Amino acid sequence: MRLELAANLPGERVDQFLARSVEGLTRSSAQRLLEGGFAKREGKPLRKNEKLSEGDLLVLDLPDPERIDAIPEEIPLNVVYEDNDVIVVNKPVGMVVHPAPGHSSGTLVNALLYHCGETLSGIGGELRPGIVHRIDRDTSGLIIAAKNDVAHLSLAEQLQDHSLYREYETVVIGNLKEDAGTIDAPIGRHTKERKKMAIDRQNGRRAVTHWSVIARYPGYTHVQCRLETGRTHQIRVHFASIGHPVLGDPVYGSKKPYPGLPGQCLHARRLSFRHPRTGEVLTLESPLPDYFLEVLKKIGR
C-alpha cells in the first residue's frame, strides 16, 4: 500500500511524524520502515532522525502484512445465551477477541468458529466474523456475537443509538469524592504512543461513562459503570484521567502488578439488548469472577 503524506509541523522528526499520521503505526514500527527504506522524500530514503519542513511530501510504501487466518479451534466457551441469531459468551481474562499480529490463535473468534461453524455473520470480515463489539484481552465478562448479517446489523444499530446496555464493575485506586457521576471526555489515539488511547478534546470522539459507587475500601473504590459510548479502553482511560486508574492496569495506571490479579480489575457484568428477530429485550448477567472476589477480600482486610 502506498501513502502520500504532507508534513505540517516544521522541525518534527520523520519517525514521530509517521507514527502520528498513520493509524495503528507505532514509533518503533515507523523506525523499522525507515530502516528498510520504505519512506522517501523526493525519491530518496529518509533516516529516522531526519527533520521535516512544512509541506514536505513523503511517500510511504507499506509492505504486505503477515497473513493471518482465522481457523476453528476447539476452545471451551462459557456460553450464557445462544439461539439461531445471537450468542453471548462470558469471556475469561487473557483471551483476545479476534486474531491480530501476535495473536493468530486462541482467540474468541477461533473458539466461535469451532462452536458455531459457518453460522457467524460475515459483516465483520474474515478475521472478525460475528463480532459486534469488543472487550479488552485482560477484561473479563459478557460479549455478544451475531450469527447472521440481519442480527449483526440490528445489534450494530443498537450500539449506535446507545440502546444496547453495557454495565461493568471495576475497582479503581483511591477514593472517589462523589457517590455517582459522569465522565464526558472525548477519546482519541495517543499522539506519541500509538497503542494507547488518551483524552483528546480537539480530535477525539465523544466518550461518556456513567458511574456509581458500590462500596468503599481504604485506598480503593468498587464502582459500577454504564457505557453510553464504547470507545477503545474507555473506562480505563476515563478513570485514569480523573486520577483514579483501574486497579491492575499497567498501561494507564501503576506499572507494578497487583499480587494475584491476572489483568485489570474490570468485568463486563450485565448486557441488555433487543433481540434482532423477536424484539424481546434480553438482559443477561455474569457473576463476578473469582479473581475479582479475591481482590475485594484483600482490599477489605
Image (tube, rainbow, N blue to C red):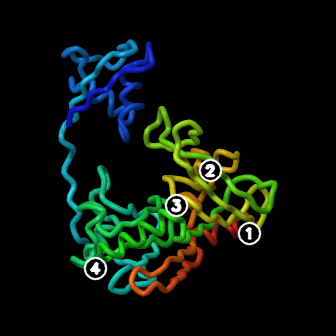
Residue in view at x 27 percent, y 24 percent:
34
Amino acid beneath label 3? Pro
Residues 219 and 224: in front is 224
* Label 3: how many Cα within 10 Å (few below 14, some 14–19, many 20+): some
Give the CA distance from mark 2 to mark 3: 21 Å
Residues 96 and 6: in front is 6
Give the CA distance from mark 3 to mark 4: 29 Å
Tag 1–tag 3 contact (CB < 8 Å): no
Vertical relation: 41 (above or below) 214: above
Residues 142 and 200: in front is 200
* Mark 2 or mark 3: whose residue is earlier in sequence: 2
Residue 95 image point, x, y percent: 40, 64
* Mark 3 or mark 4: whose residue is earlier in sequence: 4
Q: In the rendered structure, find residue 238 and report the number of the disc placed on it.
A: 2
Q: In the rendered structure, find residue 262 and report the number of the disc placed on it.
A: 3
Give the CA distance from mark 1 to mark 2: 18 Å
Give the CA distance from mark 1 to mark 4: 37 Å
Give the CA distance from mark 1 to mark 3: 22 Å
Q: Which residue is mark 1?
A: 214
Amino acid beneath label 1? Ile
* Label 4: how many Cα within 10 Å (few below 14, some 14–19, many 20+): few
Amino acid beneath label 2? His
Q: Tell me the SS state at disc 4.
A: helix
Amino acid beneath label 4? Cys
Residue 55 image point, x, y percent: 36, 16
